[in-house]
Image (cartoon, rainbow, N blue to C red):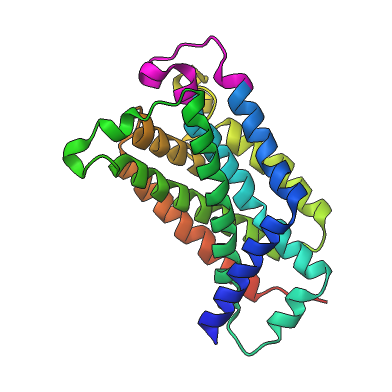
């Protein structure tokens, strides 16, 4: 029954995402806008290899959509609270950890779909996957791509867990909007998604290394365009650790949630 519930909750999240056309289009509109209008800016960065600013920017925009979509999983929890669905499944004879797992996997799946969409869109716009070709001896042509997918999944797990954790302690959308304004945008802007970290003031650079998305964006750049600043092993380790922490936090807070 536990596995069946996980699957049912995962499938419900995925179906709901694709059936809500306005949400689907709205979630992709801003990343596409950033990609098109900023990607063709006359900016030359050494980190972007031969692909120009588009190649540098695309991994950052992928990180952005993963952040936004994953944190948006918290909105799904609030919707279920408002309309009574959460109360119905919480009285079922199953562990609340199972509910968290199903919601989390659903959020990660929809976020991953959006990220891959942006990746595919960026290719004809000028993204050059030099990272894939740069490491043929380490596992073949597709190593960089599958490594990027792994980073996408870890970013999704980290921020889906965080979104569910916040939503577990809130009762209305106003509270979650507060979190969105004061957490999500600063996390995105200090991750190095739009500009290299070394252009930030020294004091701000220290803050960027506390930001999990910094390691996600850096890992995506290393995988896709061979332009990571930090070792990929460090990026993976940090994201793996933060994903475990946020999911554990979400599970703990969700077990203490009471639905009226």
Which quarter shows the C terminus? bottom right
- Residue 3 x %, y %: 51, 80
Q: Is residue 45 magenta?
A: yes
Vertical arrangement, residue 179 with respect to residue 48, above or below: below
The answer, for residue 226, to whether it is visible in the render is: no
Tell me the residue at 41%/37% (across/down): 220
Tell me the residue at 38%/15% (across/down): 46
Q: Is residue 248 magenta?
A: no
Which quarter shows the N terminus? bottom right
Which secondary structure type mostly characterizes the magenta part of the structure? helix
Report the number of numbered marks: 0
Start-end of magenta stretch = 37-56
- Residue 171 x %, y %: 80, 63
Q: In screen coordinates, is 171 left or right of 129?
A: right
Q: Farthest residue toward the left?
A: 137
Q: Nearer the viewer, residue 79 or 178?
A: 79
Q: Farthest residue toward the bottom?
A: 93
Tell me the residue at 35%/34% (across/down): 222
Q: Nearer the viewer, residue 100 or 12?
A: 12
- Residue 118 x %, y %: 54, 38
The quarter of the picture where residue 66 lies is top right
- Residue 252 x %, y %: 58, 70
Q: In screen coordinates, is 131 left or right of 115?
A: left
Tell me the residue at 75%/82% (across/down): 88
Vertical arrangement, residue 149 with respect to residue 90, above or below: above
């Amino acid at each position: 029954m536990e596995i069946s519930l996980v699957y049912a909750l995962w499938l419900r999240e995925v179906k709901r995402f694709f059936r809500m056309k306005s949400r689907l289009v709205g979630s992709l509109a801003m990343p596409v806008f950033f990609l098109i209008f900023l990607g063709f800016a006359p900016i030359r960065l050494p980190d972007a290899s031969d692909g120009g600013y588009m190649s540098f920017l695309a991994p950052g925009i992928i990180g952005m959509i993963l952040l936004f979509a994953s944190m948006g999983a918290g909105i799904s929890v609030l919707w279920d609270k408002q309309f009574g669905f959460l109360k119905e499944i919480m009285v079922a004879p199953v562990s609340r950890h199972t509910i968290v797992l199903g919601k989390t996997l659903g959020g990660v799946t929809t976020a991953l779909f959006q990220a891959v969409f942006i990746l595919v869109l960026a290719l004809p716009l000028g993204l050059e996957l030099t990272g894939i070709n740069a490491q043929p001896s380490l596992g073949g042509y597709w190593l960089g791509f599958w490594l990027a997918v792994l980073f996408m999944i870890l970013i999704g797990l980290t921020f889906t867990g965080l979104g569910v954790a916040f939503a577990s302690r809130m009762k209305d959308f106003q509270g979650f909007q507060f979190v969105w304004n004061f957490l999500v945008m600063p996390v995105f802007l200090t991750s190095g998604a739009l500009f290299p970290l070394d252009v930030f003031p020294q004091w701000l650079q220290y803050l960027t290394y506390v930001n999990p998305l910094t390691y996600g964006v850096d890992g995506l750049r290393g995988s896709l365009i061979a332009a990571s600043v930090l070792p990929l092993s460090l990026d993976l380790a940090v994201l793996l650790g933060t994903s475990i922490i946020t999911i554990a936090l979400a599970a703990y807070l969700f077990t203490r949630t009471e639905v009226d």
